[in-house]
């Protein structure tokens, strides 16, 4: 269990306000150390400082730092069998990219990588197949499973286009429609189609 004093009142407010500066300083300093370790690796073919910085970094920061080193440095990484930690190994065939490493800090590296990856297109048939599998596994009502299987067949089948058919309005179009707003029916009045002639 952690042992520290709980901060309260104005001291807590000041501590939180100063946290942004501490984080910015940490990121800048960590970036400087990481680039310096890469420069040493490039000049001396020695991973000693890369490994030391990785080992001394907080556990929640190590993954991003490892990916950053692998991207810009002449090294590979061999994970421990336990899954935690590992060793950097000099890779003769790779090249160091100090210029690229200077452009992005290890703390921001993974964030930048995520934004450049393209999102996978949603596939309704695949999603519904997983739903059917889950419903079957959980022993859901057979009628529900058959209904979802029917929806899955529709999603997997060809797209049928009917001539002169208007597409269904989206939720935003429905809400913005002036006809709908002016035409709110009295809930107590039966529709005209159900009216009985006297």
Image (cartoon, rainbow, N blue to C red):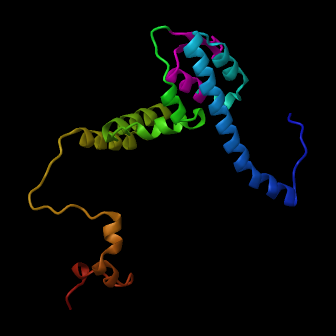
| In this picture, residue 198 sits left or right of residue 113 | left
| In this picture, residue 2 sits left or right of residue 183 | right
Q: Which residues are magenta?
A: 64-91
| In this picture, residue 59 sits left or right of residue 109 | right
Residue 169 at x, y percent in the picture: 27, 65
Q: Nearer the viewer, residue 75 or 194?
A: 75
Q: Is residue 69 magenta?
A: yes
Q: Residue at x 55, y 15 (%)?
A: 42
In the rendered image, is residue 140 in sight? no
In the rendered image, is residue 49 in sight? yes
What is the tally of numbered marks visible in this picture?
Answer: 0
The quarter of the picture where the C terminus appears is bottom left
Q: Residue furthest left?
A: 163
Q: Residue at x 70, y 18 (%)?
A: 52
Q: Residue at x 59, y 10 (%)?
A: 44
Q: Is residue 167 magenta?
A: no
Residue 28 image-quadrant placement: top right
Q: Nearer the viewer, residue 91 or 157?
A: 91
Q: Residue furthest front?
A: 43
Residue 154 at x, y percent in the picture: 24, 43
Residue 113 at x, y percent in the picture: 47, 35
Q: Nearer the viewer, residue 123 or 69?
A: 69
| In this picture, residue 186 sits left or right of residue 51 | left
Residue 29 at x, y percent in the picture: 68, 35
Q: Residue furthest bottom?
A: 198
Q: Residue at x 17, y 63 (%)?
A: 166
The quarter of the picture where the N terminus appears is top right
């Amino acid at each position: 269990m952690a042992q520290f004093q709980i901060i309260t009142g104005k001291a807590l407010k000041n501590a939180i306000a100063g946290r942004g500066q501490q984080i910015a300083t940490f990121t800048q300093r960590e970036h400087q150390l990481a680039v310096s370790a890469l420069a040493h690796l490039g000049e001396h073919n020695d991973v000693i400082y890369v490994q030391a910085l990785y080992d001394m970094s907080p556990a929640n920061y190590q993954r991003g730092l490892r990916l950053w080193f692998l991207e810009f440095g002449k090294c590979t990484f061999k994970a421990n069998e336990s899954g935690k930690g590992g060793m950097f190994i000099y890779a003769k065939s790779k090249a160091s990219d100090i210029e690229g490493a200077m452009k992005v800090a290890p703390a921001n590296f993974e964030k930048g990588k995520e934004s450049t990856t393209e999102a996978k297109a949603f596939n309704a048939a695949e999603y519904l197949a997983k739903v059917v599998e889950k419903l079957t596994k959980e022993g859901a009502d057979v009628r529900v499973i058959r209904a979802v299987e029917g929806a899955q067949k529709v999603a997997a089948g060809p797209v049928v286009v009917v001539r002169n058919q208007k597409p269904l309005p989206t939720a935003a179009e429905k809400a913005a429609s002036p006809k709908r707003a002016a035409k709110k029916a009295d809930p107590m009045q039966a529709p005209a189609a159900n009216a009985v002639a006297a």
